[in-house]
Image: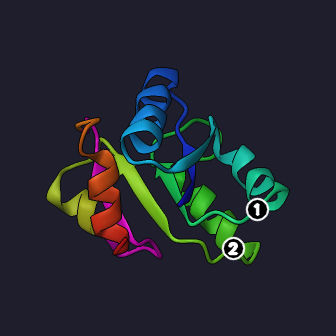
Amino acid sequence: MRILLVDDEDDVRAIAKMSLGRVGGHDVVDVQSGTEVLAALDAGPPFDAVVLDVQMPVMDGRGTLDALRAAGHAVPVVFLTAQVQREERATLEALDVSGVLSKPFDPMQLAAELGAVLGW
């Protein structure tokens, strides 16, 4: 599967890319900001999913989700977030997303968790 990974933290992005790519066998393209998402979605072959950090500067995950939906992109989105309190998680899950995964994550399990959320 082809995945667009969006996270502003270099170390998190590197570990998640390795986890999804090497462990999970996915083709992963990574960007560091919400503003780069639309360009990446429009640039090449379609993505099967977007893994999107919630807390980012300039354009956060919710703003990015709104922008990509407004642009007509129906790609499944899974939030990756450190916001794990029940109320916050429920609020995120109520948005137009396929699921919510928590940080910190186990690099050996991230691809399997993403697959389970997306039904892969």
Q: Amino acid at mark 2?
A: His
Q: Label 1's element? A: loop
Q: Residue at x 47, y 76 (%)?
A: 96
Specify the quadrant of the image occupied by residue 15.
top left
Which labelled disc corresponds to residue 73?
A: 2
Question: Looking at the image, is 98 positioned above or below residue 45?
Answer: below
Q: Earlier in the sequence, mark 1 or mark 2?
A: 1
User: Closer to the camera: disc 1 or disc 2?
Assistant: 1
Q: Residue at x 40, y 72 (%)?
A: 98
Residues under labels 1 and 2: Cα distance?
Answer: 13 Å
| Magenta-colored stretch includes residue 59 | no
> Within 10 Å of the Cα at label 1, are there few (<14), some (14-19), or many (20+) other Cα atoms?
few
Q: Residue at x 35, y 46 (%)?
A: 81
Of 42 and 18, nearer the camera is 18
Q: Amino acid at mark 1?
A: Pro
Of 90 and 77, nearer the camera is 77
User: Horizontal and vertical percent for residue 31?
Assistant: 65, 38
Residue 85 vs residue 46: left or right?
A: left
Q: Which residue is mark 1?
A: 45
Of 62 and 8, nearer the camera is 8
Which labelled disc corresponds to residue 15?
A: none
User: Horizontal and vertical percent for residue 40?
Assistant: 75, 51
